[in-house]
């Protein structure tokens, strides 16, 4: 069986649209974001030398790098597998090879593709202390709303008034 024109075009399309363009754009925009953060710090305090990033900027850097790495690791195998399947479609394959390729198709086409959208929450949770504290506060707020934990009533405080006559 020869690869059809559709198979060839689809493989090239997937390779460019899924495999090359998004990681390239993610890297470019991450670098632009980091550059703008550094320039903003220099504009705010030009007299100080830039010795390091602030804590939130460091967390943002970790989040950006982690996001790009997870995207590449979870999505890039799919376009390569698609190209491989198109190139080797005309080769006679043993049953063992077909089973291995079916397993790899499942891993790259189903399992890894679904990891990327769900990984963002876990990336942010593990790399950002600020995000963790916000999530904790949100869960506490939801818990208080669901379970209607009674809050202690506040007693009015007596304030001293000074009047001048």
Image (spheres, rainbow, N blue to C red):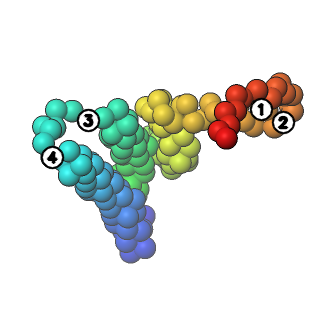
Q: Which residue is mark 4?
A: 46
Circles 4 and 3: CB atoms closer than 8 Å? no
Q: SS at mark 4?
A: loop
Q: Which residue is mark 1?
A: 143
* Quadrant in the picture for the C terminus: top right
Q: What residue do we see at 30% from left, 35% from top?
A: 54
Alpha carbons under labels 1 and 4: distance apart: 45 Å
Q: SS at mark 3?
A: loop
Q: Which residue is mark 3?
A: 53
Q: What residue do we see at 45% from left, 33% from top?
A: 128
Circles 2 and 3: CB atoms closer than 8 Å? no
Circles 1 and 4: CB atoms closer than 8 Å? no
Q: What residue do we see at 54% from left, 31% from top?
A: 132
Q: SS at mark 2?
A: helix
Q: Give left or right: position of 143 versus 49.
A: right
Alpha carbons under labels 3 and 1: distance apart: 35 Å
Q: Residues within 10 Å of mark 4 (few under 14, many from 20)?
A: few
Q: Is tag 4's residue or tag 3's residue first in the polypeptide sequence?
A: 4
Q: Which residue is mark 2?
A: 146
Q: Nearer the viewer, mark 1 or mark 4?
A: 4
As displayed, is residue 1 above or below residue 80?
Answer: below
Q: Which mark is residue 52?
A: none
Q: Is tag 2's residue or tag 3's residue first in the polypeptide sequence?
A: 3
Which residue is more in the foreground, 18 or 143? 143
């Amino acid at each position: 069986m020869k690869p059809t024109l559709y198979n060839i075009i689809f493989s090239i399309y997937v390779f460019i649209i899924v495999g090359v363009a998004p990681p390239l754009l993610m890297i470019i925009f991450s670098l632009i974001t980091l550059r703008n953060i550094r320039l903003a710090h220099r504009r705010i305090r030009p007299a100080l030398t830039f010795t390091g990033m602030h804590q939130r900027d460091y967390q943002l850097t970790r989040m950006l790098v982690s996001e790009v790495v997870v995207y590449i690791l979870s999505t890039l195998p799919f376009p390569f597998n698609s190209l491989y399947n198109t190139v080797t479609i005309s080769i006679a394959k043993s049953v063992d090879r077909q089973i291995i390729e079916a397993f790899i198709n499942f891993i790259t086409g189903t399992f890894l593709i679904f990891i990327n959208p769900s990984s963002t929450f876990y990336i942010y949770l593990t790399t950002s202390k600020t995000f963790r504290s916000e999530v904790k506060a949100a869960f506490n707020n939801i818990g208080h709303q669901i379970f209607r934990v009674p809050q202690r009533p506040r007693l009015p405080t007596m304030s001293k008034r000074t009047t001048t006559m």
